[in-house]
Image (cartoon, coloured by chain):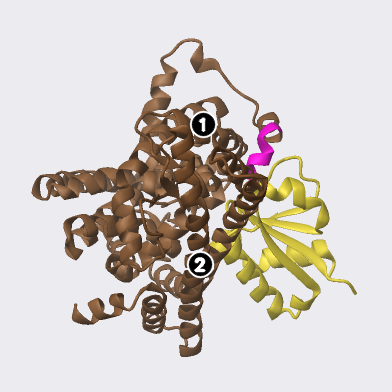
Amino acid sequence: MKVLDFIVSLGASVMMPIILTILGLLLGAKFGKAIRSGLTVGIGFIGLNLVIGMLSDNLGPAAQQMVERTGLNLTIIDVGWPAAAAISFASKVGALIIPLGLAINIVMLLTRTTRTVNIDIWNYWHFAFTGALVSAATNSLVLGLIASAIDMIIVMVLADLTGPNVEKFNGLPGVSLPHGFSAAYVPIAIVINKIIDMIPGIKDIEADPESLQQRFGIFGEPMIIGTILGIIIGALAGYDVRGVLNIGITMGAALVLIPKMAAMLMEGLIPISDAAQEFIQKKFKTQSKLFIGLDSAVAIGHPASMAASLVLVPVTVFLAGVLPGNRVLPFADLAVIPFMLCMIVPVTKGNVFRTLIIGFICISVGLLIATNMAPLHTQLAIDAQFAIPEGATMIASICDGANPLVWIILRLMETKAIGIGLLAIVAVGLVIFNYKKGQEENKSIAA
Amino acid sequence: MTQKNILVACGTGICTSTMATKKLQEALKKRGKDGKVKITQCKVSELVSKAHDVDLIISTTTVPSSIKTPVVMGTAFLTGVGIDKVTDEIIDILGI
C-alpha cells in the first residue's frame, strides 16, 4: 500500500503513465507499446487539465456575476464526464479498477452469473468513479473497492437483462451494454414505462423522431451549443459586447476541445483493452451463448434516442434555471444526454414520447443529485491535482455525477454496516436471479 | 490518385470511433492501402452537416435515414469479430 500511496501522490499525469505501463506489461504488451500508451494517457490528462482550467477560469467568474445580477444560483459548473473519467482513473480505486474489473468479470463468467464478456475496459471508469467517491467519503480504500465491485455486478446483470432487447431494437446481434451510466436508468425506465401503460390517452401518444431530429438538430453540434450558451451566460452576467463574444467563442472551444483530450485518454487505453479483450475472450470461447459487452455509444444512433436527447438539451438548460434546489450550471455534459437515453429506448420500444418523459424525470432528479454530490466531486478533482480555481466554484457532471445508482451506492456505503449489508443482499439477489434466468434460457435452447 | 475520405462516426465522436479508427488503420495497413484514405472522426449527430463531404461513412451506431453517403457498420472493429470481411467491403466500396 505504501508504494501505491507514493505513486498516487505523484499526481495523475505521472501516476497514470506508470500504472498503465506496468499493467500493459503484465497483460503481455511490448515495452515500447506499453510506455507509449501510458504516456498518451498522461498527455491526455494534462491536456484535459488545461482545457478545464480555461473553462473554469472563464465560466467561473461569469457564473458568479450572473448569480449576483439575476439571482440564478448556478455556481456549480458542469465540467463534464471527461474530467470525471480522468479523476476516477487517477484515484487509488482507479489505479486498481482494471484488474478488479477483469477479476469480477471472470468470476461471474465462471460461476455463470453473467453472460457478458465485458471488453469495454475504458468504461470501467464508471465503476471507479463510484468507488472513488465512496473512498473519499469514508476515507477507506477497501470500502471504495467494495462499492466499485457492487456497482459493476449490478451493471453486469442489467446488461444481461437488456441484451436481448439491444439485439432487437438496435440491430446489434450478440452485443450487450454493461455501461455504468446508461444501464443505471434501465430500472427507472421500466417502472415509469409501466406507469405510462396504465394512463389512458397518454399511453397512445407517439412522436415522429425524424422531424424532431431536423428541428432540434442544431443542439447536436457542440461548437454551436457551446458558443450559444457562452453568449447567453455572458449576457446574463452583464458583460459588454466584447466580453460576451469572447466568452461565447471560449465556451465553444471548451466544448469541442474537452472531448478531444478525453480521446487521448481513450487512445492510450486501447493497447491495454486489446490485451484484456484477447485474454478474456480466449478463456471463454467455449461457453454457449455469450454477449460481447460494448460501450453504450453503439446504441446512441437510434432515432428515438437521438431525437429525445436533442429536445432535452434546451429543456435541461431551462430546468436548471427553474428547478428548486438545483445549483448546477449544465454545460459540458449536455453532449452526453444520449447516453442517459440509449438504454431507455429498448424499454420504451423506441417510443420517442415516452423516452422523452422518462428522460425529463431522470434529468430533473439528476440535477439535484449532481448538486448533492458536487462537494465530493470537487474534492476528488482536488485530490487528483486538477486545476480547480480558488474561491466558491465547485464542479459537477450531469453524466456520472448525476447517476442515481452511483448516488444510492454512495449514500448507503456511508452508513457503513447497514448500507453495505443492504447492497450486498441486492447484489447477491440479482446474481442468483441472473444465474437462474441464464440456466432456463440454456434449457430452452437445448430443448 | 487523390485520397478517399472516410468519416468514422459514433455516439460521442470520441470513444468507439477512436477504437474503430485505430483498428481500421491497422487493417488497411496490413493490405498496404492505408496511404489511400484520409480518416476523420465525428459525432453521429454531426453527420447531417458533414456527410456530403466524404466518400464513405463508417459508423458504430445507427445513422439518420436521411444520409445519402454510403454507410458501413463498424461494430466489427469493436468486437474484433469479422474485421476482414468489413475491411473488404470498405475497400470494395471505395474502389481502392
Residue type indicated by callout 1 = Phe
Chain to which the residue tagged by mark 2 belongs: A
* Relative to A134, B73 lies left or right: right
From this viewpoint, which residue is outermost toward the top?
A: A200
Residue at image point 60% right, 51% down: A247
Within the image, what quadrant is residue A256 found in? bottom right
Q: Secondary structure at mark 2?
A: helix
Is B81 located above or below residue A164 in the figure?
Answer: below
Residue A409's spot in the image, x, y percent?
25, 47
Q: Position of residue A244 (x, y in %)?
A: 63, 46
Pointer 2 local density, CA inside 10 Å: few below 14, some 14–19, many at least 20: some
Which disc, if any, is residue A20?
Answer: none
Badges 2 and 1, same chain: yes
In the rendered structure, the colour chosen for chain A is: brown
Disc on the earlier residue, 2 or 1: 2
Magenta stretch: dominant SS? Answer: helix
Q: Quadrant of residue A96?
A: bottom left
Asked which quadrant contains residue A419, the reply is top left
Which class describes the residues within 10 Å of circle 1: few (<14), some (14-19), or many (20+)? Answer: few
| Quadrant where the image shows the N terminus of chain A | bottom left
Can see residue A209? yes
Q: Which chain is yellow?
A: B
Q: Which residue is mark 2?
A: A50
Which residue is the site of mark 1? A318
The relative height of residue A187 versus residue A202 in the rendered view (above or below) is below
Q: Amino acid at mark 2?
A: Leu
Region in magenta: A215-220
